[in-house]
Image (cartoon, grey):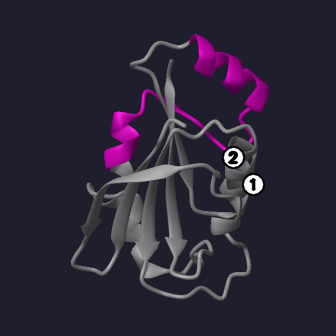
Amino acid sequence: MAKLQAVIAMTLDGSIPTKSEPLMEWIQSDRDGFPYWRKRGTRLLFPGYPLVSLICEKDTAGPSTVFHAEIYDEKSVEFLRGLSLYSLVDELVIFLIPSVSTFPLSVSAHLPSGNWRLVRSKTFRNGVCRLHYCRTLQ
């Protein structure tokens, strides 16, 4: 069965970063940021992607298929809520930005429930911390 990875940018308080956050440009363009994970995905997902279709596609796709979703703004947080509601996320990559946002929209409130195992973590020179989690079987 295919897996779905959600790559998330959020601040220390669990919110989405503001559009003016300078570290968001780094996350979206640096080879260690979103582009690295985008290359590992075989199917790019976007906000508004029909979840019923995704459920069917995920069940029928081969194990080498990796669905990739990037979460960093209002629309993508709503998409994450849907993915979490249907327990579709198998892998979380969280880019933790070392700031507290004034933006009221919480990403952490929509993270998928369940048991997660930290696979890797890395702190970059600019203070961003990348946390890579995989869902554990119960």
Q: Whole-percent x and y of residue 11?
A: 52, 77
Q: Secondary structure at mark 2?
A: helix
Q: Main secondary structure of the magenta part?
A: helix
Q: Is residue 72 magenta?
A: no
Q: Secondary structure at mark 1?
A: helix
Q: Which residues are magenta?
A: 36-60
Is residue 107 visible to us here? no
Q: Amino acid at mark 1?
A: Glu
Q: What residue do we see at 35% from left, 49% from top?
A: 35
Figure check: 38 above or below 20: above
| Marks 2 and 1, the one that precedes in the sequence | 1
Q: Is residue 57 magenta?
A: yes
Crowdedness of circle 1 by 10 Å Cα count: few (<14), some, many (20+)?
some
Q: Whole-percent x and y of residue 6?
A: 52, 47
Q: Whole-percent x and y of residue 100?
A: 55, 88
Crowdedness of circle 2 by 10 Å Cα count: few (<14), some, many (20+)?
some
Which one is nearer the viewer's eye here, 21 or 9? 9
Q: What residue do we see at 69% from left, 42% from top?
A: 83
The numbered mark at residue 84 is 2
Q: Amino acid at mark 2?
A: Ser
